[in-house]
Amino acid sequence: MVAVVVLTSSLAAPAVAADPAPTAARSTASSVPSESTTTDLARASGGVTAGAGSATTPAASTADGDDIRLTTRLALTPERPGEVDVTLRFDVPDRVAELDATIVPDAKGVTTNGFSAAGGGTYEWDGDTATPTISYRLPANQTEEAGRFDRRSTASPASESHRRSVGFGGDAAATGPAGAASATTAGERYIFVDTGPWAMVRVPTPGLSWRYRGETVGVRRETTTVGPGAAGDRIAFLGAHTVRKRTAHGQTFRLVVPERAADDMTVSPEAVLDSYAAASDTLRVGDRDESVFVVAAPTGVDWAVRGLQTGDADAWVRAGEPLDTAESPWLHEYVHTRQSYETTAETRWTIEGSADYYAAALALEQERIGFSAFADHLARGTRDPHAGAVLSDPGTWASSLTPYRKGSLVTGELDRRIRLATGGGSTYGTVLARLNAESEPVTGKRLRELVAAASNESVGDASDRYARTDAAPPVWDADGHEAAFGTLAAWLDVEPPAVVEIGGPYRDGDRRTSPATVAVGETVTVPATVANRGGAAGDYRVALTVDNRTVDAANGTLEPGTNTTVRPSWTAAEPGTYELSLHGRTYEVRVREPSTPRVASLSADRTAVEAGESVLLTAEVVAEGAVPADGEVTVRVDGEPVGTERVRVAPDATATLTIPVAFDRPGRRTVTVGNRTLTVTVSEPPTATATDTSSTRTPGFGAATAAAALLVALAALLGVGRRRSGE
């Protein structure tokens, strides 16, 4: 979720000029090419009369040499995690007579050159040293316990000054600093941290006061790092990183991707910059800062929030946060950079309400979500415990989530009503632009006036009703959205599968999670569902890449509310490990040569036969490991091959072979199939007896035996005859 804090320096009144909080200083870092430095001029007006410099509307600049130049140098201290070294170097022009600098009260090991301690964390310049310095160790860790995110809270004197901080915590309680604070207790949740090898810290901004002669003297600020690092106005990252840049619509976006966060990114840096460029054009509400500085915060730290925006246009977002969602911190924090007005308790809800609403609306407009996801997001404000809260009375809020939930819903409803009342000529963006132009904190009455001025009194009344009572508007449907916002564009949602399918000579439709192992010659198919959740027909192209090379793609057109399944595929030709990707999801596929089939078991229908008979062997064959098997299984009798059988078998499957084997001579015969053996006993056929009068074709009888039997029979017949004649 998001929350806000405004901190102001409450230093003693300066003798002539004060620089309580710079708002447009730009920074350079040693790891990237130096850029021209845009400065923040906090000037006193006229001669030697006292006056406070403006942090939001600097006076016209004089020549660079007429201003005090403050260079803040930050350095890691790997041997002391939780601290960074800070050196403040001042280049003081001749016309400055006095200069005081006040640093944070918990600074450690302060050393100076050209400054002397005056008490209370304030140091006085000696008036002679042209480039005086103040060096100290800054406790860098800040946690949610450093103070609640309260937009109206004020920092203690000499705290690190900044205009606004916003923490986006989603469903968690959002908390953050009311001032610089050290955190060393294990288990605390951080908003800034120094881990030793890298750090993401708040840029220290000392309070300054000075006396000068003649023309106005201002302050120019710059932040540098010792070693690799990148710095914005209020946030600095120290450590190895890359910087991605994009310029669009008068804004330059710098996205810092730490080396430790590169593998954590769930969305490409280019996609984030694409979204920012589109949002910069669409969100026409004024307050478009020239430079936006965003850090992708590494994981491995227990961050208190999902993202945080501070100063004018600095932010960090956890590297693993998504972009294609209704509550993306990437867009949420960008919307905060486009808000520059101050609120009262009555209008505090508009900060988070409009940021939450526009993050979802921009995602819908950029076709990153569909209308159903957008409507579901707003519908959270219609449910307890937030629906019954009174937005203008923070005391009734169920939790710090209320301005996000109900505030987002009310902002959206006002946007819809304003569009309908003006035929699209005005929007809530019109109101936000006028809020940004306000010079005083916005009251509830002023908010109603601005809403009515952008539309009509009826919408103004609705604004009051939804802000000052417990009334909650319903979420409009798709037809209502089209009536107010125009036809919904096609929004094609591609849902990659959790598993891939494998087919080919060994198996068909086998489903495997990543990493999947296949054999050369097998085909990997990645079936994906494509749905059109938008309001118009749209064309789709779903491409399957292998090691960043497109190997297959499915194209087509879908009408609104329809879906289809596409099946791009790839056939493995060479062994190796490959990365298949489809619509942002990757699958590791390991390709191997087929394994050798292994006979897991061997049996026979009988193990005792007579010579000339055969047995029927049954062999169960499996694959070795995760890769399919392909090869020949040899059948041997007493070690001599008598035949082969070709077999293919998938992993986790069994192939059954039935093999007849005949035996032509008696004995104990050893039968081997693959690596399995069994013994078959082969016996001689039985021999015929003298009383056997069966045919000579009886099994076991040969030709000679049959002839002898015939002679015996004839002799017996003749003998009987002779005995009869003698009687």
Image: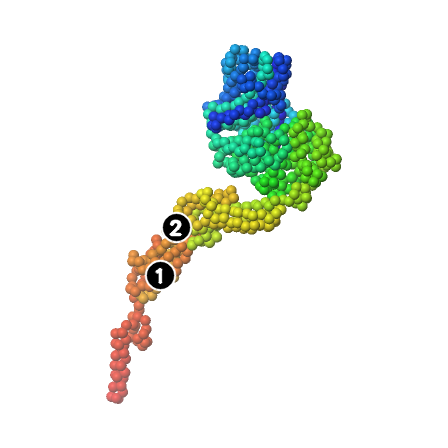
Instruction: Give the x, y percent position of residue 390.
Output: 70, 33
| Image position of 717 with respect to 464: above or below | below
Q: Residues within 10 Å of mark 2 (few under 14, many from 20)?
A: many
Location of mark 2 (residue): 594
Q: Residue at x 69, y 33 (%)?
A: 391
Between 537 and 716, which is closer to the camera in this rendering?
537
The residue furthest front is 63
Q: Residue at x 68, y 36 (%)?
A: 426
Q: Secondary structure at mark 1?
A: loop
Which quadrant holds the C terminus? Answer: bottom left
Mark 2 touching mark 1, by CB under 8 A?
no
Instruction: Give the x, y percent position of residue 40.
Output: 58, 22
Circle count? 2
Q: Inspect this view and state whether residue 579 appears.
A: no
Q: Tell which circle, 2 or 1, labels the residue nearer the N-terminal end.
A: 2
Between 708 and 538, which is closer to the camera in this rendering?
538
Between 63 and 156, which is closer to the camera in this rendering?
63
Tell me the tag on residue 607. Answer: 1
* Callout 2 amino acid: Pro
Instruction: Give the x, y percent position of residue 349.
Output: 66, 32
